[in-house]
Amino acid sequence: MNKSEALHFIGDFLENFKSADFEGQEGYLVKMNESLRVYPEFSAYVETEFVHILKNDYCHDLVKEYYDIWETLQEHTNNRDVFDVTADVTKFPLSFTLFAQDNIVKKYPELLENVVESRIAYLNENKDNLNFWTNLQIVSAIAKIKDDEKCVKLLNKLFSIPLRDTTLTESFVRKLPTVFKSHTELGDDILKIINKNDWCEQYMETMAEFAVIDEVKTEEVLSCMHARVQRKPRDSSLLNKYYKAMESIIEELPKFRSLAETFAKEALTYAENNSVSRRSAAKLLNDQQSLGSRAQIGKRTDPAEKNPYDYKYIDSVKDDEICFLTIGGDTALKDEAANGYAKRAFEFLKDLRMEKEVSVYGVAYDFGDLFDEKKALGRQMSDYGHVKYNAEYFSQISEETKNPQFIRKLFETFILPRISQNNGKNRRETNDAASRMAKFKIWAHCFGAYVTLKLEELSLQKMEQLGYKEDERLFIQKQMQVLAISPHCPLGVSKSNLLAIVSAQDNNVTHGNFFEQQIRKMVGKGKIIPLSYFPEKQGRFILVNRMFGADNKKYNGSDEDEHNFCSLRPVAATSKAGILAIKLARNFLQNGFERAKDSKTDIISDMEWLTKSKSEEKAFAKMQANGKELMQAITENVLKEYHKHGSKTSG
């Protein structure tokens, strides 16, 4: 661009810039800066109009382009005051001024104090301005001032401004550790400012960060934090933050653990603590018992009792009552879910007109901080030989994952009183224990089947400790009746009276065995699995091709439905096979409740457990035959694969 062309462009800029669109303005600004860099003598022609545009037509998205021209002009102007932004933030639009100030300070660090003073002055005049992008930079800028005396002077000036919006003050306080990192000699002054603002939401977090910067101040910081929680007002939120902050401090500086734990134990005595804050304190104190899992047991109640949602918490259960415990999947973490399962069980009992004779219970899980659900499920599969994991997989498994507290609570509530006396110290007479166990029924869904198998393990272990002989133990355990729907546990290993219902379309759980792999291959090839029954040695389960929709039509519902069906009543979308499976499951439970009423404990056949009419006996016999044929087909497939590959198939 020659001089004549540059002069012509400047005229075009002055005339047409304001009316140009965004891209046009961007092009004008870039080209204008190039022209002024080549011909700085033209600056005088542009200066006044550019300042006017900057003040009145500025676009923040073009701040870099505006700044480039501003920088060029201020280098060649005879009137530097017009372009000075270090003393007055309000001279130009705020975002532009701060952008310019930041760039000036990079070139001229000695101007930093002036820049900070201008921002504090602006804030003092605009107490209601909550512009984080603007104001959060003040404390960070103060941290860069090398002189300690000037630094603390500016901090005191900043925090003397009576800001109406506390959120901004909190943001300033949160940045103070940054200043301490650069000015460790100012520890007392900075700590004093933080403590004056101990009402801030992030006070504890700020103090924790401050504490680990210099060990000389750590004990004092811990004492200040503790003094704050000793003083009211305080609530569970403050206490929770207090415990978490102390934990972060001792992770960095373990030498202060003893003092932190002493303070935490005192704070735990305050009534304002809740379950969340106590859990945080338990982490700090490494209280394994408090960090473990827990179960909240609830009971369905008569509407006349007027309990919320006809559900109330319980601590104990009568050892001779007929009871129906619903154990949900791993999402049963709240009372609403637990009560949902219990309500369905109660409705089933109403169908049988037995709701007044059977107590219904639900359970909500709290897995705590130490229980690893994935490893717990994997370990159970491995323990029963269904899945093989290397030793390293379980090397870090916690004791809580091996023996969850929430399952022990269920055992001690529902099973231990039925097989023992005197708080678990003495055994019962065998027939007495068997009769009581026969009155205990479980309906488990998904993860609930894992829980059920763990309950069984505890039961058998305890009976052995109490002196029951092996045949007695097996006889008593066989009385515990379980219906497991979509079970996430190994099948064919239970010593209880367990019946499972499984959908071939359920992809949410895996049992890790060859049978399942073959079934999935068949389904993948489009084969319709006939409604089948497999006896105890093969898992004792009903296999349904699909629970919802027709076998030969696409189901319009969710694929999750095949796993999440957990009702004892069929719905409109339930398949024909699903309806029969649910009917047999209802029979299984109904027969169990009727036998419990009559104190029957004799061993009966699967046909007797699952059917109540001649037509059902015929249908069940067909299911048994289907199961045998399916097992035979799978065996033949195994042999074909063996001969095809010339080696034994793994699984």
Image (tube, grey):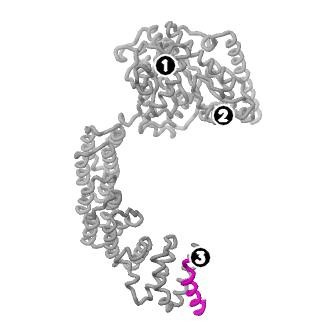
Q: Earlier in the sequence, mark 1 or mark 3?
A: 3
Residue denoted by label 1: 324
Residue 567 to residue 376: above or below: above
Mark 3 falls on what kind of element? helix
The range drawn in magenta is 1-20
Crowding at mark 3 (Cα within 10 Å: few <14, some 14-19, many 20+):
few
Is 130 on the left or on the right of 25, as rendered? left
Q: Is residue 307 magenta?
A: no
Q: Are marks 3 and 2 in contact (CB under 8 Å)?
A: no
Q: Are marks 1 and 3 in contact (CB under 8 Å)?
A: no
Which mark is drawn over residue 541?
Answer: none
Per the model, the C-alpha gap separating discs 2 and 1 is 40 Å
Crowding at mark 1 (Cα within 10 Å: few <14, some 14-19, many 20+):
many
**Quadrant of residue 644 in the image?**
top right
Per the model, the C-alpha gap separating discs 3 and 2 is 70 Å
- Amino acid type of disc 3? Gly
**Quadrant of residue 166 in the image?**
bottom left
Q: Is residue 461 visible?
A: no
Residue denoted by label 2: 650
What secondary structure do most residues of the magenta stretch adopt?
A: helix
Where's the C terminus, which quadrant?
A: top right
Q: Is residue 6 magenta?
A: yes
Residue denoted by label 3: 24
Mark 1 falls on what kind of element? strand
Residue at 24 percent across and 48 percent down: it is 226
- Amino acid type of disc 1? Phe
**Quadrant of residue 578 in the image?**
top right
**Residue in the foreground of this view, choosing between 219 and 3:** 3
**Residue in the foreground of this view, choosing between 445 and 517:** 445
Across and down, in percent, residue 235 comes to 30, 43
Across and down, in percent, residue 624 comes to 69, 17
Per the model, the C-alpha gap separating discs 1 and 3 is 76 Å
